[in-house]
Image (cartoon, helix red, strand yellow):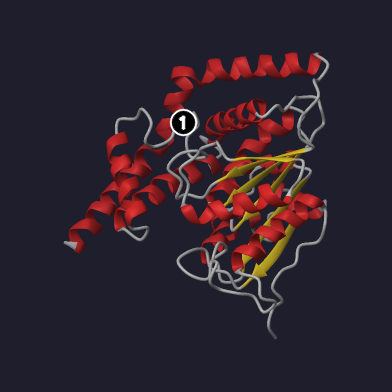
Amino acid sequence: MIVSLLALLVVVVLLFLAVGPLEALGWWRAEGADEAVTTLAEIRAAHESVPEPVPYSHYVVYLSGIGAIDGTSIPEEEQPLIEHLRGHLPGFAVLNDVFPYAPDNRGLTAARPMARMWSWIEKARFANPEALVAMLVNARNAIQLFVCADRRYGPTYNIGTAQAILHSLFRAGYQLGSDVPVTLVGWSGGGQIALGASWYLGRAGIPLTVVSLGGMLSDDYGIDELQHLWHFRGSNDGLEKLGGVLFAGRWPGAVGSPWSRGLKEGRISVYELGPMQHNVTRHYFDTKTFAPDGRSYLEVSAEAIEAVLLGTEPKVIPVEK
């Protein structure tokens, strides 16, 4: 039985690999191009008008990891981090209504051909977070991460997620041209999605920064549009390390890549949070593993993000010698 399920999982993953870029291309052909023109008109009109008072001093958009089903149904372990930021950042708007793994912001259980399957998987995952079928969500969303980072398909995909983020900001009262800062906080795959969207958001005149928590980051051109990128990683996080291996623009000899430029210009700060793993146990959201100072790993992660958003130095777990 287990062998059959594993075989089925492999087949489905290969299918996702084959059709992954088609969602972005299909969206662009059907409606994306028209939406992009409309969004461009909105940006131009906003910059030509006098910005209205903005209700918040800083906007934070949280982009979930590859376990997300839609913009609101994210893995339960991530919720405390979002609530921590909302409770410790007075005057900030913390938004989490963007689904990073679809260019049209359409969740997996929305109007899709396979919506019933995703709904069934969502119920199975809530009943047992370790259920094997839950890995299908991760596999499907991971493919979209690589579409985002692809130089051929990425621009189409990223303009869609940039629009979704922009509309989320508008719903919360953000005004283009107000110079109110925006920070994209991306966990895991959400870190790369944030970089991809940054190319367009930065060019809309938004003062933009990104915080990556365990992100598998590429050398995306969106880095060139950032005022700063803070990348937090765990020393035992093997998945995060893959970003520096898979994407040649992050290799030490890749002089002139967006990543290299960002490092040289001091716009990228990389912090070792501590001996975190990516998932399963001893991870960034772990509430049962504690640092020597008594903080849980979740508190270490949340307070580090809070610190850079407030302009202070994050307190990491010291490396044992």
137 and 52: which is toward the camera? 52
Residue 75: image x %, image y %? 46, 51
Establish if 81 lies above or below 300: above
Which of the image's four quarters has the N terminus? Answer: bottom left
> Residue 255: in sight, yes or no?
no
51 and 152: which is toward the camera? 51
> Residue 290: in sight, yes or no?
yes
Residue at (74, 13) in percent of width and height: 45
Establish if 169 lies above or below 319: above
Q: Is residue 19 left or right of residue 198?
A: left
Q: Is residue 247 left or right of residue 198?
A: left
Badge 1: how crowded within 10 Å, few (<14), some, or many (20+)?
many
- Type of residue at label 1? Ala
Residue at (76, 45) in percent of width and height: 90
Q: Is residue 253 left or right of residue 217?
A: right
Task: Please state the total of marks drawn on the protein image.
Answer: 1
Q: Is residue 145 left or right of residue 308?
A: left
Q: Residue 197 sits in which quadrant?
A: top right
Residue under label 1: 24
For this orientation, the residue located farthest to the bottom is 321
